[in-house]
Amino acid sequence: MLMADAVHIALAGNPNAGKTTLFNYLTGARQHVGNYPGVTVEKKEGFYLHEGQGFRIVDLPGTYSLTAYSVEELVARDYLVNEQPDVVVNIVDASNLERNLYLSCQFLELGVPLVIALNMIDVAEKRGIRIDTEKLSRLTGVPVMPIVARTGKGVEELLGTVQAVSRADARPQTLIRYGVDIDEALRELVPIIEEYKLLAETYPASWTALKILENDEQIVAKVMLENMVVGQRLIDRSAVLARHLQDTLEAYPETVIADHRYGFVRSILR
């Protein structure tokens, strides 16, 4: 099996969700440890062979979000965008779904090919937590697979699903709504971003618009670098929204967006 034929998987998730446990289970001694360029964040990469199919597996830094507030978040986000893995496997602690699925929401927003792996399903069951994986899959629009990374339970089935997703080249649709004011601003910004093809080769227009509204410094700088005039139009519209939300809700756009992400998570867990 040539590495060129291998399915490229990025393992992503909150710290302590079992991401590295799964990585070690799959790769064993067949892993390489280095650093991401320009930072001291550890990069782990390995290889696994499953039923004749090779998997190139990267263990991304544990992170709670895809904002650019920490080096780990920035490294994880840049890897997903720049390296474009065939599938992102989002490792979720099944016993702490609400907190973990917040990151899953951001993968949905970014539109990466996604499989959610519900890890520590045995711990959740012992605590009396029952999870309807079919319902969760239906409401998120992506496959949801229960596993126990520590023992390998469900891992073979997970890899089969990952392989199917990589072949389908399917990308999830954003299902999240952010309230009247944010949604209206997005409807204004997205067509402008699409018209001028701002960061079009890197990010979905809806995600770029969302990041501008969140005042994500990295994305705003990239937009301004591509087209300063149009970029300023987008920033001005974002500033209008920020002032409106401050006047009416005493909140910043990024806070309102985060609240609606959690609202989406709670709605699918009912």
Image (tube, rainbow, N blue to C red):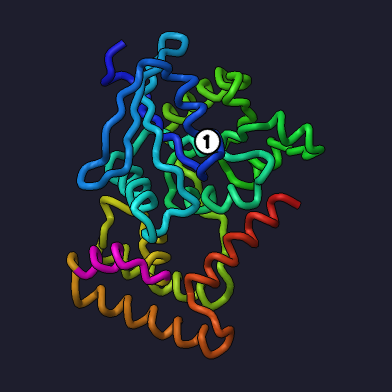
Q: Is residue 173 above or below residue 181?
A: above
Please say whether residue 146 is one of the residues in the magenta stretch: no
Give left or right: position of 190 versus 200: right
Seen from the viewer's position, the closer of residues 128 and 140 is 128
Please provide percent x and percent y for residue 191.
Answer: 36, 68
Q: Residue at coordinates 20% horizontally, 77% vertically from top-left?
A: 229
Q: Residue at coordinates 24% horizontally, 75% vertically from top-left?
A: 230
Stretch in magenta: 214-224
Give the residue furthest to the front: 40
Q: Residue at coordinates 44% horizontally, 35% vertically from top-left?
A: 11
Give left or right: position of 168 versus 260: left
> Circle 1 is placed at which residue position?
115
Magenta: predominant secondary structure element?
helix
Please provide percent x and percent y for residue 225.
Answer: 18, 66
Q: Is residue 233 above or below residue 195?
A: below
Question: What is the three-letter code of the residue carrying label 1?
Answer: Val
The quadrant of the image that shows the N terminus is top left
Please provide percent x and percent y for residue 249.
Answer: 58, 84
Q: Residue at coordinates 56% horizontally, 68% vertically from top-left?
A: 178
Q: Quadrant of residue 203?
A: bottom left
